[in-house]
Amino acid sequence: MNHDESTSRRADAPGRVPRKPPSMSQVTTDPRMWEMIPLGLAAKVRSLLRWAAASSAEAAAVGRARVEMLSLALAICTAIFAVKGFIAYRDLDNAAAPPQVYGDSVAASVARVAACCGEDFAVGLGCFVVAAGVLGCVGSSGGRAAVRVLAHLAAAFALCYMVINAQIFHGVRHFLTYALVQHAGGFRPDRSIYEYATSPFKLALALVPILTLASHLGGVCAFPRLWQRVTRVAWRPLPLAVAGLVFVGAGQAAQRLVVTDSADDYAHNPHLHFVRSLFGTVSFGDDGGGDPVAAGVPPAHYIPGHPGHHPGLLAARPTNVILITAESVNSRFLETYGCRMGTTPFLRRLDEEGRSLTFENFYATSNKTIASALPIFGATYNDPTKLATILDYRDYPTPAAANWLRARGYTTYFLGTGGHTTWEGYLNVKPAFVDKAFDVGLDTSHPFWQAAARPTALTEDDYLDAPMFADLRRALRALKGRKFAVWAWTYDAHAPYFDGPGPQSFPKEHFPRAVLGRPEKEADFERHLRAIWRLDQLIEGLCLELEELGLADDTLIVLTGDHGEAFGEHGFIGHGSSVYEEEVRVPCVLINPRLAPLGRRSGVLGNHVDLWPTITDVCGLPANPRWQGRSLVGEDSGQRQVYFHAYEAALGVRDGKYKYIWSFRDNRDLLFDIDSDPLEKQNLAADNPQLCAEEQRRVKAWANYQTRLTQDRVAADEK
């Protein structure tokens, strides 16, 4: 028996453990391994093996870091899924306020939430691939440690941002965008969401990132081999590509099938959504080239200088003007417009007695105050590519009606409720419109305000509708004997719907379905109705004051709303979400006994740019040639169109009985027959493709014209 056979038998003998082969470190350090190798060759082999050992250790370190990144990505995606599940449970659970993501069964709800997280999962996968790729390129352990720390800090920030967006979605049914930051006045502390956050929100803001990162690190430490196996499978091109396609496909399907346009942000990743809003530019192509004639639009509809005045309109005309802008009031909740909840008994009585003229088809040009201000103050449309013209062009040359009237011998007053944050602290509204145009504005040093019991009251948050109307009556007494125009802007009906005197209950059979059976929402809606009821009473008191002063015949009162307020008709409560009727259809009521020859009601189509051409027509004054609107009195309504927009979302036009909305964010057509479907429940677009194409060309031509007009006026003003 030779030596090799003896060794083999001893190794195979029962009870003996086979000797393990030497490790790489033993090979490179044991001198006996090199005795039989020539010296020069041995050095080269030893160097090569040491490099291999180092590469193997580095690969292991990179592998462990990739394991950590995969675990982190999965933990973040799980947390986002949980937060979106909470959003669905809290805000998207009502069949009467679609979309209903949480409902019928738990399994179906989970599936819908998961589909709506498709974009979130795709973003998480992309972050994992980027982090893992960077780790593979970093050659030092210190560099890898820095990448891991940065990844965990980014994860904590992403989770906090997700919690913040959950609270924002609860309030406005949208995730945060740059436009919303603009609308809120920036990230100033007095307007940050943190100030208005509840205690549970603050707790979630701290616990969600802490618990998510703790579970991720604990899982990696507790099950290292499992995570290594999972990472080896995941870190391959085919699984990564398949997962990416599945996530993107699920997200796209959810955006089209699960959510509607009133809550479509829910199916987007909030982080990517904000980034898109920073770099996205709104453009409507070159349809019509901004030429309304090319789009088949009669120029008088929005070309400046076509006021459509009627010299022989009235034998006797009012002289003075009081314009009341009702904050967040749509026409649907006024008895003058068919409401059966007892909200405006005085306005109903005026209508029945023929002492008012009600325009039944009147619209705001947008769904936000900041965008409604320019048409109301200056009879000019905004540039629809902007949230509001005065935000991008802070010194925009507004053809202010107040300045136009002052040049014709009028004394002008502006009264606005809501305190400092509503006017002084709200974007550029006060500097752009109030400070530049009125004899008496919101300057507490003016003698008119110094004569008040509390001279600084108008800057305080409790300066609401009732004290403002008291100041309005005081102003009328001071103005008697002079021509005057007074603007009065209310605030009680704005969220959170300030409460006060009024009916404690309203007939619930007429409530919007989305608020029924939800005590908190019912209470909000009733406070809103009470605010409208109080406004009606305040207008009655104003009319009595005018009669006592002998000014009733000579004073035209105009009531409108800056925009509407939704109560779940299309899933959203509040305003700023869409251009459905509840958000853009507003009242327009003219009150004066001399208007009787014009009739009680008019079906003419109109919007805010038509206010001042109409007022000057009724009062026998010339119109500013820079105004875009046209008088609403004395003509047939057959060939009019009115336009509106929702920033970064939609353009719309009311054209006869049809209302067309182009949701350009997802290139979707909406067409409604308002005469037969006033609640906009039946989309007729699929059956009328040619009409939709014509209306889309029309709204694009209007939008492009407005952009060009805005730029031309800014350029001319700068010369």
Image: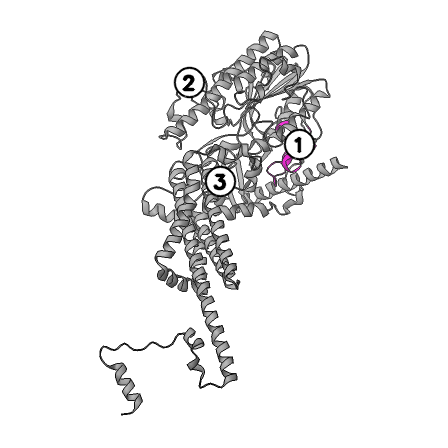
In the drawing, what numbered circle is on residue 628?
1
**Mark positioned earlier in the residue sequence (1 or 3):** 3
- Quarter location, residue 392: top right
On the image, the x and y values in percent for residue 68 come to 43, 57
Q: Nearer the viewer, residue 98 or 49?
A: 49
Q: In this rendering, is residue 185 above or below 35?
A: above
What type is the residue that disc 3 sits on?
His
The residue that mark 3 highlights is: 174
For label 3, the SS is: loop
Residue interval drawn in magenta: 376-399
Image quadrant containing the C terminus = top right
What type is the residue that disc 1 sits on?
Gln
Mark 2 or mark 3, whichever is nearer to me: 3
CA distance separating discs 1 and 3:
32 Å
In the image, is 180 to the left or to the right of 117?
right
- Residue at point 44% right, 19% down? 342
Q: Nearer the viewer, residue 220 or 117?
A: 220
In the drawing, what numbered circle is on residue 411?
none
Does the magenta segment cover residue 387?
yes
CA distance separating discs 2 and 3:
33 Å
